[in-house]
Image (spheres, rainbow, N blue to C red):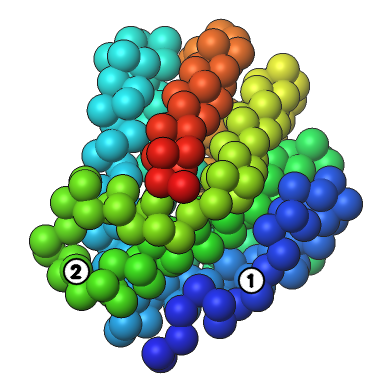
Amino acid sequence: MDSNSEAVQIDRAALLDPEQTARLGELIEHCMLLEGVRQSERNYAMMQAVEQSQKRRLFRTYDDFNVQDRYHRATDFFINELYAPENLAQRHSDLEKMVPFMQNWLPEYARQAVRLALRCQLMAYHLDLEVSDQLIETGVAPENLSEQGYWRAYEAVSDPASRLAQIQLIVQVGQALEGLVKRQSIYLTLKMARVPARLLGIGAVQGFLERGFKAFRSMHGADEFLASVSDRESRLITEHLDSSG
């Protein structure tokens, strides 16, 4: 495939529209299409390099949280589950199979968390693909991608509104997961669903929700962590995009 992120057209503003959260099937479809673009011969190696570069940066940025028992699980979940999970294609496949059952299996507030996570992933896909496209067009080899090279490409193609929207979505996902923690009954539901989910072939989604619940429960309050994510990522946007204009 020689198409880039424009192969799947999504209105980014719509990703922030609460009314869009009802369209779970459409979100899953877009995620699976973008996963195909990500794994294409043209994009895969560079997307892997971009994601790994960002994961290293994120672990450095949030090392002060990661080293604390209270925040370690949440930091790992934020980076390895929300930003660039290893089993994302399987999770999308599971979600596609789950749609007919979600109404009965998950309460609305849990389905909302899934929808927000999908919107967050769509935004990350689009933004990372733009950076990847820029790196490919300027002749950067994936194995030679440096942090400075990443930021040059980021500055060349990013706009503050989309990047701030991405942060807003991340915080919204965190708030939704924090809301799950306040409803202890959902954890019992998730635990009881482990075996049925595996038998139905939807274990990746069940595992994502259970790990998210445990990560946010271990913080005993997510306000400080989410505020720090919003503040630190927003300052990076200001640093790189205000100065690049």
Label 1 and label 2: CA atoms lie apart by: 28 Å
Q: Residue at x 41, y 46 (%)?
A: 244
Q: Which amino acid does label 1 sit on?
A: His
Looking at this view, name the residue that lies furthest to the bottom. Answer: 1
Disc 1 crowd rating (10 Å Cα; few below 14, some 14-19, many 20+) is some
Query: For the N terminus, which image quadrant?
Result: bottom left
Q: Secondary structure beneath disc 2?
A: loop
Q: Residue at x 75, y 48 (%)?
A: 16
Task: Kindly identify which residue carries mark 1.
Answer: 30
Where residue 19 appears, as percent x and y from the top left, is 88, 52
Mark in the foreground, 1 or 2: 2
Determine if residue 198 is in view.
no
Where residue 203 appears, as percent x and y from the top left, is 52, 54
Q: In this view, does 117 lie above or below 26?
A: above
Where residue 126 appears, as percent x and y from the top left, is 52, 63
Determine if residue 75 is in view.
yes
Q: In this view, does 33 lie to the left or right of 140?
A: right
Task: Kindly identify which residue carries mark 2.
Answer: 140
Q: What residue type is labelled 2?
A: Val
Q: In this view, does 217 lie to the left or right of 29?
A: left
Q: Residue at x 55, y 77 (%)?
A: 6
Looking at this view, name the residue that lies furthest to the front. Answer: 245
Q: Is residue 189 above or below residue 50?
A: above
Q: Is residue 207 above or below residue 59?
A: below
